[in-house]
Image: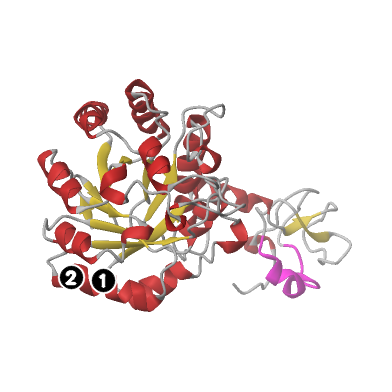
């Protein structure tokens, strides 16, 4: 997969997305500051969400439209009220896109209906994200796929059959490049519910797709493990300050944490390396001196026999390999050798290499 100038593949450092979501506090200046924080964090992209309360639900007090879950961050609110607070006004988008582009960070969005796709096309969005709760919204999938641009799909709540249906709709409607993100749709998500084995499972089931993680856990543990398991795209929510009381703040990283997060992912990916054995660098090669080797530990005159009293296998490693120790015992010295001398083959009479 390619987004603008960035190749996304297992051979490349994971593509990290900083998600602003509803953390803008209803203030465009706060939103612009979040874009700047995303760029400063080392993330590859900053992502918005493009909807209004009216494009995602209706204003209703009927029971279906209330969130009644004591464990939810949004318990006791109507869907309309929540989305009215959390949406990013569409007239902010041009300024947010322009700020990101000025700073050299990719910028795109999650559209929640077909009108949002048309709007984002006018902003020349380079790719699209499908939210977990929208991946069963077939008209939206077809609309996004028809753009021909890369598509990242969060797979929260989805069975493998659900994901297959989404994949088939996207491919059938013209999608060329797809990334599937393992996701736990709880906020925040418990690390125990991460089930990161889904990442290689998705890769095996959809070998032409990139795979990754939409991370709602606290901290970077899940992201680093996901990287080791083959994630090529990782998404994390960003807030400006721990004091923010925005709708998604409870499971979002502050700017300092996001910097640590992107570094941990990059370091984790670098640590994977290759299945190389032996010294990995000239620095490690120098450490060979701390291996044991055969040293003379008592003065020896030419013609004396080598014994366990005048030879030992000790550090450092400048003498003969310890595998010759038993062969040397009982043989005679070709020359005078002082204590502390690393034993060499030429010093031993009749020693075969």
- Most foreground residue, 306 or 190: 190
Asked where in the image residue 346 lies, by quadrant, the reply is bottom right
Name the residue tied to disc 1. Answer: 167
Give x and y (percent) for residue 20: 38, 37
Give x and y (percent) for residue 182: 43, 62
Residue at 53 percent across and 50 percent down: it is: 187
Q: CA distance from mark 1 to mark 2?
A: 6 Å
The span shown in magenta is: 320-333
- Most foreground residue, 339 or 233: 233
- Most foreground residue, 52 or 180: 52
Left or right, 332 with respect to 92, comes to right
Residue at 18 percent across and 70 percent down: it is: 171
Left or right, 70 with respect to 283, comes to right
Q: Quadrant of the N terminus?
A: bottom left
Visible in this render: residue 111? no
Left or right, 97 with respect to 173, comes to right
- Most foreground residue, 186 or 215: 186
Visible in this render: residue 120? yes
Give x and y (percent) for residue 102: 22, 26
The way the protein has been coloured in the rendering is secondary structure
Callout 1–callout 2 Cβ contact below 8 Å: yes
């Amino acid at each position: 997969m390619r987004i603008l100038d960035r190749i996304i593949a297992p051979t490349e450092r994971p593509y990290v997305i900083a998600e602003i979501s509803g953390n803008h506090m209803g203030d465009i200046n706060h939103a612009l500051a979040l874009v700047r924080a995303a760029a400063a964090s080392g993330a590859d992209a900053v992502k918005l969400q493009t909807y209004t309360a009216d494009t995602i639900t209706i204003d209703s007090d009927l029971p279906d439209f209330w969130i009644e879950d004591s464990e939810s961050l949004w318990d006791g609110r109507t869907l309309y009220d929540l989305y009215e607070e959390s949406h990013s006004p569409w007239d902010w988008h041009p300024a947010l896109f322009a700020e990101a582009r000025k700073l050299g960070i990719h910028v795109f969005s999650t559209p929640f209906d077909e009108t949002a796709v048309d709007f984002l096309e006018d902003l020349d969005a380079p790719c699209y994200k499908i939210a977990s709760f929208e991946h069963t919204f077939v008209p939206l999938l077809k609309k996004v796929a028809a753009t021909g641009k890369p598509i990242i799909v969060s797979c929260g709540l989805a069975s493998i059959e659900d994901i297959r249906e989404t994949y088939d709709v996207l491919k059938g409607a013209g999608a060329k490049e797809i990334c599937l993100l393992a996701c736990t749709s709880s906020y925040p998500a418990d690390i125990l519910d991460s089930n990161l084995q889904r990442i290689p499972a998705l890769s095996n089931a959809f070998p032409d797709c990139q795979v990754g993680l939409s991370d709602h856990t606290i901290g970077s543990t899940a992201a680093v493990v996901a990287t080791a398991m083959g994630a090529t795209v990782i998404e994390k929510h960003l807030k400006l300050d721990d004091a923010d009381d925005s709708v998604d703040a409870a499971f979002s990283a502050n700017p300092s944490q996001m910097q640590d997060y992107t570094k941990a992912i990059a370091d984790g990916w670098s640590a994977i390396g290759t299945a190389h054995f032996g010294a990995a660098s000239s620095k490690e090669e120098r450490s060979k001196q701390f291996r044991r080797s055969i040293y003379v530990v008592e003065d020896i005159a030419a013609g004396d026999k080598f014994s366990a009293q005048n030879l030992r296998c000790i550090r450092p490693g400048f003498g003969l390999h310890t595998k010759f120790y038993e062969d040397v015992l009982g043989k005679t010295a070709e020359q005078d050798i002082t204590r502390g001398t690393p034993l060499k083959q030429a010093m031993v009479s009749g020693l075969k290499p």
